[in-house]
Image (cartoon, helix red, strand yellow):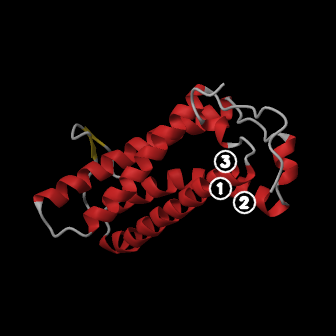
Amino acid sequence: MTPAITQRAARYGQTAMALHWVLAAAIVALLAMGWYMTGLPFSPQRLKLYNWHKWAGMTILALSVLRLLVRVVQRPPVLPESIRSAMPPWQQLAHHGTHLLLYALFFVVPLIGWAYSSAAGFPIVVFGVIPLPDFVPVSPALADMLKPMHGLAAYGLAILAALHVLAALKHQFVDRDGLLTRMLPGRD
């Protein structure tokens, strides 16, 4: 067990925290919706959920662009030396690799979904009002290839998000190093 943190962990900014938690909730909800709706028989309810899923995915894509811009402008706080030195090299690599892959999948999953929807000939109309252009031309063969890719990328995102949560909980309750408090609002 590593010693408790001896120096105060630098915190993320309020905008970064808000985007983190909004996107976390939205991604969990959208993953659950995707899993649920694919098991439904063809019906008006299933069509409605697919439309919601598509515009919610585009909203997540837009929020991910904003989150990336915030991350570029407001660099994330450096891990305090007391935490960094207590982490074996493989954990440091996992820390950076998981964040990098999460950010990549924030873009890959909705972009593959958009491409699939376009290739299948089903337009995306955000909020039922704003039609998006087709991302790729209609192509049943391409749609057949993209559909499982979207699902696999979404499952990859779910697995990485679960690992991210488990690592945060380990730092909070096993290491007791205060790392989690860097992303919790209202904790000064």
Q: What's the distance in space between the residues labelled 3 and 1, CA to CA?
A: 9 Å
Residue 94 appears at what percent x and percent y? 72, 60
Q: What kind of element bears circle 2?
A: helix
Q: What residue type is labelled 1?
A: Ala
Residue 77 vertical placement versus 140 (above, below): above
Mark 1 or 2: the one toward you: 1
Q: What's the distance in space between the residues labelled 1 and 2, CA to CA?
A: 10 Å
For this orientation, the residue located farthest to the left is 44
Q: What residue type is labelled 3?
A: Gln
Mark drawn on residue 94: 2
Q: What kind of element bears circle 1?
A: helix
User: Considering only order in the chain, which callout, 2 or 1, is on the residue closer to the N terminus?
Assistant: 2
Residue drawn at x 69%, y 31% as measured from the top left: 11
Mark drawn on residue 172: 3
Rate crowding at label 1 as few (under 14), some (14 to 19) or many (20 or more) other CA atoms within 10 Å: some
User: Considering only order in the chain, which callout, 1 or 3, is on the residue closer to the N terminus?
Assistant: 1
User: Considering only order in the chain, which callout, 2 or 3, is on the residue closer to the N terminus?
Assistant: 2
Residue drawn at x 52%, y 51% as measured from the top left: 106
Q: What's the distance in space between the residues labelled 3 and 2, CA to CA?
A: 17 Å
Q: Which amino acid does label 2 sit on?
A: Ala
In the foreground, 177 or 64: 177
Name the residue tied to disc 1.
167
Residue drawn at x 81%, y 40% as measured from the top left: 5
Mark 3 or 2: the one toward you: 3
Q: How many labels does the image show?
A: 3
